Amino acid sequence: MSVSADYFEFYQLPESFRPDVAELKRQYYALSRAYHPDFHATESPERQQEILQLATLNTNAYRTLSDADLRMAYILGRHGLLEEGKQELPADFLLQVMDLNEQLMELEFEPDSAAAARVEADVNSLTNTLEAGIEPVLAGYEGLPADARPQALKQVQTYYLKKRYLLRIRESLAKFAPRS
């Protein structure tokens, strides 16, 4: 297994945004025991190194696949959808974000708890709409035929990028909240 090993293949699971969590955990613990360095102390140095690499792969795979955001980024990355310059968002969304950022700049100069609450409500509303729209795509991805997956992945990419924009706005908003 190389550094670019397929984590889903490593755990014998289908690529999925909603993997079987119990099976993921079962595989992780089974492989943690199998690749525990203490059980391979009498092996050759080469084999011990290989076991250590497999143990590290197991840890990284589990950490990635058990976290929804890391898993999403991992799947998108595997399909080349997180490369710089290949990320276009709809103009209407970018205008909404620009408007929210302008409101944040105004809050920076004139703290106003009512205005901050309105920005937060707008961000929550956008987030809820995003979540509701992507959920069927995430849930149904695993069952899609291969030729339908690229379209679903594009939808997930757009969702992921929008979500990151909204997260940055939330982080900015959190800085103003205590002052207002």
Image: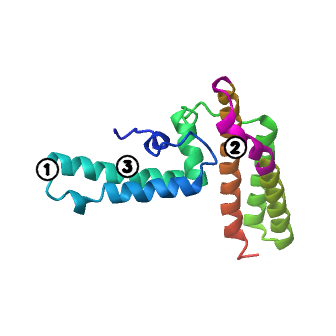
> Does residue 20 appear left or right of residue 136 in this picture?
left
Give the CA separation, mark 1 to mark 2. 43 Å
Residue depicted at 82% across the width and 73% down the height: 113
Magenta region: which residues? Answer: 131-147
The crowding category of the residue bearing disc 2, from other C-alpha atoms within 10 Å (few below 14, some 14 to 19, many at least 20), is some
Q: Amino acid at mark 1?
A: Pro
Depth check, front residue: 165 or 45: 45
Foreground pick, 169 / 4: 4
Residue 74 is at least partly visible in this image? yes
Q: From the viewer's perspective, is residue 177 above or below residue 26?
A: below
Residue in the image at 60% along x and 46% along y = 72
- In the image, taking residue 40 as reference, residue 178 lies left or right, namely right
User: Which residue corresponds to mark 1?
Assistant: 45
Residue 34 screen position, x and y as percent = 32, 55
Give yes or no for residue 137 being in the magenta stretch: yes
Question: How many discs appear?
Answer: 3
Which kind of residue does numbered mark 2 sit on? Leu
**Height in image: 75 above or below 25?**
above
Residue 32 locus on image (x, y percent) = 37, 58
Mark 2–mark 3 Cα distance, whole angstroms, equals 25 Å
Q: Earlier in the sequence, mark 2 or mark 3?
A: 3
For residue 57, side relative to residue 45 (left or right) = right
Indicate the quadrant containing the N terminus: top left, top right, bottom left or bottom right.
Answer: top left
Q: Which mark is residue 57?
A: 3
Task: State yes or no: residue 19 in magenta.
Answer: no
Residue at point 79% right, 57% down? 123
User: Alpha-carbon neighbours of circle 1 within 10 Å: few (<14), some, or many (≥20)?
Assistant: few
Query: Measuring 70% from the left and 29% from the top, which residue is drawn there?
Result: 151
Identify the residue under disc 2.
Answer: 138
Asked if disc 1 and disc 2 are in contact, CB closer than 8 Å, the reply is no
